[in-house]
């Protein structure tokens, strides 16, 4: 893997002189577009086309949601997809390990945020509560863009879309354009990560077929943490392959074949081990090693018809097959070893249609995802001999899970500048678990089955306030059905906790009230959102008096009642002479009932891992010819001392009294040698400060010099 990655880097560097002969100035309008796209890593231009919030193509300005588009320019420079979300309004980063990042959207993460790829659900029934690392199986360098919608999107996308929905859109070539074969290379080197990443991609279009084929390989060494030196057991390897073929079936119909493969090796959960570096009083784990391997494969057939004459104007069909495998290897302090994992196969089909009518643009759809799950756990003694075989792995074995839904949405104009977006979804869920640990006797096996149904709705109204302003208000329900992880998980939870299966759970319900405003003029772009979410029947953990080894046993129940609220702000302003200023601000608060002890008493306190007051400020300079840009920025986070009972018990990740605040200065440079070659240099954490994002398992990188080159020929 390493030699292939090095070859990709050398290829990019060797191509540099071919394109660096003469800088090619771009027309002023193209230059300005490039500036805005780069700055808009955190603030999107409001005339940017977005699909995810409305299902139909429209601008961010028109959408009655807070949304942002992260373009390929930004995605090409980051380490992983989760890193591209850094600094977005309403988003907080969390990193259990350096290969295990999980963004929080409006206070929610894990199975409360929905990840999609070209509209295909990536969430499945083994996704767990709290942070998970599965976004790392999406190759950021293979994407055209990432669309992020904040707040409930359950009407369009079903279960899990509570904090928001993220839709990763793959690179494609229009099959109706003749485009000569192009080779794209991208290379990235980082000093603090001791990492090197390389991508090679071939694309083109001819004879009614557009194609993109690529591979990305990366090797990450041990992380150099600010003020702490190299952290052992933090490096890992990753490899990705992707292919997409788009075929022009007719003037109105396009079919596509999408294939992806992701492989992540030896991803450590370092905070659980005895080599972890403490942070402001956090405890260190006892395991000698805890690492995992991940593999994700996706094959999909996509069919889209547009400008149709008939019952519908647009029709889209997605048929997909996915496999997700996870295998973890744990070596305890006594050298006993535990190997566990699961294999999930998911068949999915989704059909969406829309039609312009006298009562607005009507959209309707149905979708069904079917999971087949097997899991395992095997224990070994220090000599490598098998000592026991578990009833199940982290989730129940020989299990199936069905998630089916039907939705209807109407986007209509009301007159006098008012428009409304109203929708409803009905969902049916069925879970069947062949083998699971009996929570009353962990040496015995039980079988579980349950089904759920729910109906949710959404109403959003927007009002145009002249040419430059659009205001909106919304009332949206969200929901999440109990999945296999809720019903049958038997695995490590937080520090010193083991979770047992919890049958008999019900769906979680959420209701969000939101008002917001957006503006874009010649010199200003801004967005403001104020939101309040009511939480009902949230599934939460409760400690018990039972022990497994040195770990406290926890179970789950629908006891969480409470609320969250927050404000998200993003602005940018042209300052003149090539300078643009920008900034974001996010403040989130929330209180929810939780179990502080093993007793039955609920205590109302802060939501677990509640993000601190945080923001990003910076300025950007771009030369008149558009070839050079420079951007200093400061990432800020306040001290987070609002801790839940779970946070206080999570001593390996959260310091006593909460996570200290920080301010991190970064200086970015970009130089465009020609239309076909671009290079960048980032000097991150210039102060080499030691800091940890709230709820994370390790410190962030210290001073980090990141070099990158992208070339096409």
Image: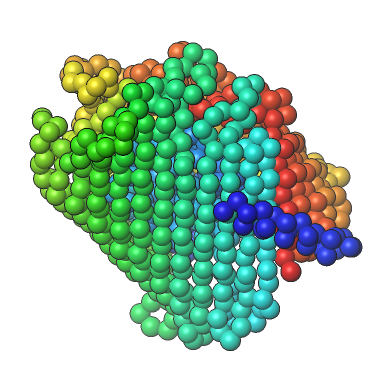
Q: Is residue 369 left or right of residue 544?
A: right
Q: How is the image coloured?
A: rainbow
Determine which quarter of the picture holds residue 394: top left
Q: Is residue 522 left or right of residue 198?
A: right
**Which residue is more in the foreground, 79 or 613?**
79
Image coords of residue 443 (percent x, y): 12, 33
Whether residue 445 is visible here, answered yes or no, is yes
Q: Residue furthest front?
A: 383
Determine which quarter of the picture holds residue 372: bottom left
Q: Residue at x 47, y 46 (%)?
A: 265
In which quadrant will I find the C terminus? bottom right
Q: Is residue 31 left or right of residue 181?
A: right
Q: Residue at x 68, y 72 (%)?
A: 182
**Which residue is more in the foreground, 621 or 471?**
621
Q: Residue at x 63, y 43 (%)?
A: 195
Whether residue 528 is visible here, answered yes or no, is no
- Residue 153 drawn above or below residue 641: below
**Which residue is more in the foreground, 443 or 79?**
443
């Amino acid at each position: 893997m390493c030699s292939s990655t090095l070859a990709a880097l050398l290829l990019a560097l060797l191509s540099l002189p071919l394109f660096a002969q003469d800088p090619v100035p771009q027309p002023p309008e193209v230059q300005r577009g490039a500036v805005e796209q780069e700055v808009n890593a955190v603030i999107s231009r409001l005339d940017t086309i977005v699909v995810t919030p409305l299902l139909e193509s429209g601008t961010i300005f028109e959408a009655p949601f807070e949304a942002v588009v992260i373009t390929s320019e930004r995605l090409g420079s980051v380490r992983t997809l989760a890193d591209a979300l850094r600094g977005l309004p309403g988003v907080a980063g969390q990193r259990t390990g350096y290969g295990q990042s999980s963004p929080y959207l409006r206070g929610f993460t894990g199975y409360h945020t929905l990840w999609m790829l070209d509209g295909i659900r990536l969430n499945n029934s083994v996704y767990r509560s709290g942070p998970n690392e599965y976004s790392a199986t999406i190759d950021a360098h293979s994407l055209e863009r990432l669309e992020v919608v904040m707040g409930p999107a359950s009407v369009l996308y079903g279960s899990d879309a509570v904090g928001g929905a993220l839709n990763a859109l793959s690179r494609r070539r229009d099959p109706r354009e003749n485009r000569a074969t192009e080779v794209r290379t991208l290379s990235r080197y980082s000093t603090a990560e001791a990492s090197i990443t390389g991508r090679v991609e071939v694309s083109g279009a001819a004879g009614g077929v557009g194609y993109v084929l690529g591979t990305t390989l990366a090797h990450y060494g041990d992380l150099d943490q600010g003020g702490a030196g190299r952290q052992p057991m933090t490096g890992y390897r990753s490899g990705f392959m992707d292919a997409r073929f788009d075929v022009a079936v007719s003037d109105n119909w396009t079919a596509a074949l999408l294939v992806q493969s992701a492989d992540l090796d030896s991803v450590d959960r370092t905070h659980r081990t005895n080599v972890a570096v403490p942070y402001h009083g956090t405890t260190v784990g006892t395991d000698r090693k805890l690492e995992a391997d991940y593999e994700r494969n996706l094959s999909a057939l996509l069919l889209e018809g547009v400008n149709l004459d008939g019952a519908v104007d647009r029709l889209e069909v997605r048929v997909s097959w996915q496999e997700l495998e996870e295998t973890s290897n744990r070596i305890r302090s006594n050298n006993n070893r535990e190997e566990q994992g699961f294999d999930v196969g998911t068949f999915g089909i989704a059909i969406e249609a829309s039609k312009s009518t006298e009562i607005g643009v009507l959209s309707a759809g149905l979708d069904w995802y079917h999971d087949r799950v097997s899991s395992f756990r095997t224990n070994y003694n220090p000599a490598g001999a098998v000592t026991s075989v578990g009833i199940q792995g982290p989730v129940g074995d020989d299990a199936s899970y069905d998630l089916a839904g039907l939705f209807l949405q109407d986007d209509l104009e009301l007159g006098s500048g008012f428009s409304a977006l109203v929708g409803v979804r009905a969902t049916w869920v069925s879970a069947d678990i062949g083998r699971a640990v009996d929570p009353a006797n962990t040496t015995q096996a039980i079988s579980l089955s349950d089904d759920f149904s729910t109906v949710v709705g959404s109403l959003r109204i927007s009002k145009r306030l002249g040419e430059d302003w659009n205001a909106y208000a919304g009332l949206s329900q969200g929901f999440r059905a109990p999945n296999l992880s809720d019903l049958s998980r038997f695995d490590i939870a937080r520090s010193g906790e083991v979770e047992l299966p919890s049958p008999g759970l019900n769906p979680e319900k959420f209701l969000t009230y939101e008002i917001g405003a957006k503006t874009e003029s010649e010199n200003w772009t801004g967005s403001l959102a104020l939101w309040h979410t009511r939480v009902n029947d949230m599934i939460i953990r409760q400690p018990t008096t039972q022990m497994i080894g040195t770990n406290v046993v926890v179970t789950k129940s629908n006891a969480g009642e409470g609320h969250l609220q927050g404000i998200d702000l993003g602005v940018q302003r042209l300052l003149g002479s090539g300078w643009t200023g920008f900034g974001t601000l996010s403040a989130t608060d929330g209180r929810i009932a939780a179990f502080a002890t093993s007793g039955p008493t609920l205590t109302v306190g802060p939501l677990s891992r509640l993000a601190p007051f945080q923001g990003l400020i910076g300025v950007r300079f771009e030369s008149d010819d558009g070839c050079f840009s420079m951007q200093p920025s400061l990432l800020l986070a306040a001290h987070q001392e609002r801790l839940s009972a779970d946070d206080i018990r999570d001593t390996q990740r959260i310091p006593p009294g909460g996570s200290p605040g920080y301010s991190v200065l970064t200086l970015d440079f970009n130089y465009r040698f020609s239309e076909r070659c671009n290079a960048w240099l980032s000097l991150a954490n210039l102060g080499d400060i030691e800091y940890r994002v709230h709820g994370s398992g390790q410190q962030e990188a210290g001073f980090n010099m990141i070099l990158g080159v992208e070339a096409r020929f």
